[in-house]
Amino acid sequence: MDLKSTIKKCCKRDLNAQKKIYDLLATKLFAVCLKYSRNYQEAQDNLQDSFIKIFDHIDQYKFKGSFEGWCKRITINTALARYRKHDVYELFNQDQLTEQEDTLEEEENLSLQFLLKIVQELPNRYRLVFNLYVLDGYSHKAIAEMLDISEGTSKSNLARGRKILKEKIQKATDEHKSRLKIKNG
Amino acid sequence: MANKKNIDQVFQEKFKNFEQEPDEQNWDAIKARLQKKKRKRPFVIWWRVAGVAAMLAVIISLMLSNQKDSTDDYTANDYIHFEYDLFIDDTLTISKQTKYALSVDIDALRSDQLQKKQQHIETKRSVAKESASNDATDPDYKKTFESTEQFVNSFNRSNHKKINKGFQGRFNFANTQTADLIPDDYTAPPQVNLTGFLNAGLKKESDTIQAGQENKETQIAQNKDASEAEDGFKEAKESKDKSKWLINPEVSPVFAGSFSGNNTLGSDFATNETTNNVSITYGINMGYQLNSKWRIISGIKKLNTSSTTGNILTANTSFDQSFAGSNLELNTPDILVTSPSSFETLSSQNESLGRIPTQKGMLEQQLNFIEVPVGLAYKLLDQKIGIEIRGGASSLFVSQNDVFLRTEGQSQQIGSLSHVNSTSFMTNVGLGFDYNFSDQFDFNLRPTLKYQLNTFNNSTTDYQPYIIAVYTGFSYKF
């Protein structure tokens, strides 16, 4: 059965069709949820909320643009709504931020699980901005609108997010190296 | 070898094809929530069923009324219907589709007529001649015949060849020595049903092939078929006396309410007090009488609805309205319209919002439709005062969708409702009371419950609106 007719069945709240859509997209959307959430449990909550929203609004999908993209946007918005609400607004002096070279010694052994973990550990706003800008390609202007912050705040949040990530990677790499040294020495 | 790499690239590469299977339990949780939503709507389903049933009733009655001509066993309604317009153009018009052959006893017709009237006039010949044979493409269909013999022959021939095509013949009395047929000073109504003086023997086709060949043979009305035929004619005459069509301008106040939900503005305003304003609906109905009990009704109406939601906070800010969780689509991005509680939540997250001055106000939603109803009316009582039950469904086309913001002394159109379907449906159930001034005119009063099925996108609101209308109007029958 093709996607279009499955979507149309979903408009009529056909549970079998809804299951098909779930099976089709769950792995991709769960990945989105994991990136934007603080932990595995919250990612599951976001995934469930997102699918409910998708099925509630599926009649608004007008078959323009990719369906997967449409669902992904809903998933991102669901996560944003959750953490926008819970975020504590940290005030900081933007002047303190200096442009740094965000590069690191590449560590081939950096696992996806490790990277995901340190992204999840980022403060809410940093995590959202980092995901939106770096992993999902939104502009600072768009992010500013989505999170109702200024573009400047978006940029500084991103820089701070990157810095934290870099430090954690550096630390892990150093630990790894020292472990190797002990082992070899 | 160490390779300097941008941190963004590291993440982008690693996450490029990142997918992860969620636990089985997630689908179970989603499924349970979806099913819960489904169960919440049994009442809605009942009303949908009522609407669909009314539509089916219309369709079935239309099908039955069309089907009659194709049944093999003929009934009273299958008989040929005669209109005898003797005093206008001296022709006999036969205009009912039929499978059965016919023979006409013109002599019996004549003597019967003579007995009844006992007077003479001269026949008007000229009109009949002028109306002769104007359908060149099908000589047997719609033709003026010059004699009884020709008429009956032609009729039977047409039945052999074109059973379902029907037959319309005009019989020219002028050429069949009927000069003494019509009284001199005859003042009866110009439309005379032939039942009284035409002995029409109607038989199944097979029986009357012979009759067609021996075309002048008389078939007298004593036989059962013919007497049944007369009953049929009488019934046909009775229903013909009553006007088939009806036109009915009407107007009603609109009292709106809802089976569930406080208002349609969305979760943000779910607890805000909402008043449905009394507005107006007006339009014209058309009716067609199917038989003595049933009538099909349709028409076109303007249906206006209006409601006011109080306790609204508004602020001049470019803060994205969509965060407030409402179904408002604003014209301008420079204004935020929300409930006080929602504003509090939003401003606790966004410091700058908390500093903006706010104003209290009300939201007025104006939602107007063009309504096209289709339905059936069933007569319970048909006296000086008539009572009927009416049911059906309407298509609704949005003609106006505006939201006004009213603050102190000011009213401003700020946008529209984002979740209104441009075309939607509504079921109608009601009672009709008529007071008949004359055969043509009556005054009517019709309390009606109208249930809006999908005016609003269900997924965005639980609001299930209904409308009570009490139509008053006049009907003219023709």
Image (cartoon, coloured by chain):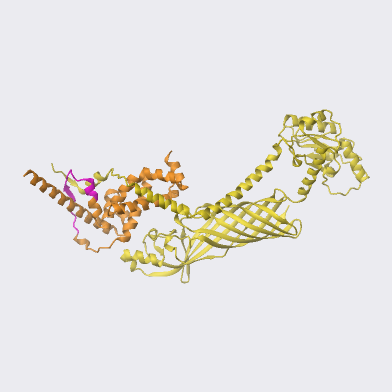
> Residue sitting at 41 percent across and 64 percent down?
B338
Residue B440 percent coordinates (x, y): 75, 56
Rendered position, B199 above or below B403: above
Q: Is residue B181 visible?
A: no
Q: Quadrant of residue B443?
A: bottom right
Quadrant location of the N terminus of chain B?
top left
Q: Colour of chain B?
A: yellow
Horizontal arrangement in the rendering, residue B145 relative to residue B303 (left or right): right
In this rendering, would B192 be left or right of A16?
Answer: right
The residues colored magenta run A97-116
Residue for point 35% across, 68% down: B356
- In the image, residue B478 sits, relative to residue B254, either above or below, namely above
Q: Is residue B337 left or right of residue B177?
A: left
Residue nearest the observer in this picture, B251 or B58: B58
Q: Give percent across and percent down for residue B389.
A: 66, 55
Closest to the observer, A14 or B306: A14
Predominant SS along the magenta part: loop
Q: Nearer the viewer, residue B253 or B416?
A: B253
**Residue B167 visible at all:** yes
* Colour given to chain A in the rendered image: orange
Quick one: which residue is furthest to the bottom in this view? Answer: B408
The stretch drawn in magenta includes residue A107: yes
Q: Is residue B467 magenta?
A: no
The x, y position of residue B159, in whole percent, is: 75, 32
